[in-house]
């Protein structure tokens, strides 16, 4: 039986340069359930670290294989892990209060190491939402992971093209009436 189910929620705000595809994570808000925290500062550090690790996985950590099928990005020279500049400018992390684990665990705590990793999906979702705004949210952009600046730029271009074709359709429909 597993005794450490943990829950969390996150919301991210990003800024996208539509000319280059570069972006910055402006703000992240996280609320995470750690049960009865043994050390809140340590838990917050684990949550933020897991979140940044996940953000790297979704935005910068691209795996590239050469033509012989060998992994070419197998070290820090070719594989970009998150740096301090990749962290949100405004990072707000809170623990759910008064929520001890109902199971008989160590001081009614919960796991905090791995679960926050998936909270970083909010960064990828914020990037897609920012790109969709180019076409007034009438277009859902295709954005593969990792969402590198190059892939973000491709999605921006697709959204821009959709917006232009939508405008042309609207003008043509108006002429027919």
Image (spheres, rainbow, N blue to C red):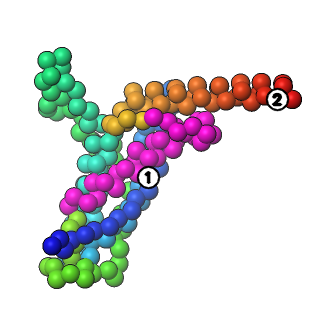
Would residue 129 appear left or right of 7 to someone viewing this image?
right
Picture quarter containing residue 49? Answer: bottom left
Q: Nearer the viewer, mark 1 or mark 2?
A: 2
Residue 78 seen in the figure: no
Q: Nearer the viewer, residue 153 or 164?
A: 164
Quarter placement of the N terminus = bottom left
Mark 2: few, some, or many residues within 10 Å (few <14, many ≥20)? few
Query: Along the polypeptide, which appears first: circle 1 or circle 2?
Result: 1
Q: Do we see residue 123 in this rendering?
A: yes
Q: Magenta residues, as a range? A: 113-142
Q: Circle 2 sits in a helix, a strand or a loop, which is it?
A: helix
Q: Residue at x 43, y 32 (%)?
A: 152
Quarter location, residue 78: top left
Percent x, y for residue 123?
Answer: 40, 47
Q: Is residue 118 left or right of residue 172?
A: left
The residue sitting at the top extreme is: 67
- Residue 63 or 28: which is nearer the viewer? 63
Image quadrant of residue 169?
A: top right
What secondary structure do most residues of the magenta stretch adopt? helix
* Residue 174: image tag: 2
Residue 54 - label: none
**Residue at image x 55%, y 31%?**
159
Q: Give the secondary structure at mark 1.
A: strand
Q: Residue at x 20, y 61 (%)?
A: 113
Residue sitting at x 27%, y 54%: 117
Residue to which mark 1 is pinned: 12
Which quarter of the figure is the C terminus placed in? top right
Above or below: residue 173 compared with residue 99: above
């Amino acid at each position: 039986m597993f005794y450490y189910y943990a829950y969390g929620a996150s919301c991210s705000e990003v800024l996208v340069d539509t000319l280059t595809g570069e972006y910055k994570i402006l703000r992240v808000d996280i609320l995470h359930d750690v049960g009865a925290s043994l050390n809140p500062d340590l838990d917050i550090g684990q949550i933020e670290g897991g979140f940044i690790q996940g953000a790297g996985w979704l935005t910068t950590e691209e795996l590239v294989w050469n033509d012989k099928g060998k992994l070419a990005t197998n070290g820090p020279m070719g594989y970009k892990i998150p740096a301090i500049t990749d962290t949100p400018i405004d990072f707000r992390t809170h623990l759910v209060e008064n929520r001890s684990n109902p199971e008989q665990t160590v001081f009614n705590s919960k796991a905090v190491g791995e679960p926050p990793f998936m909270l970083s999906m909010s960064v990828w979702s914020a990037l897609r939402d920012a790109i969709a705004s180019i076409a007034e949210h009438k277009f859902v952009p295709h954005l593969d992971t990792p969402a590198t600046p190059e892939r973000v730029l491709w999605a921006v271009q697709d959204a821009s093209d959709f917006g232009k074709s939508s405008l042309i359709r609207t003008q043509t429909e108006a002429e027919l009436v």
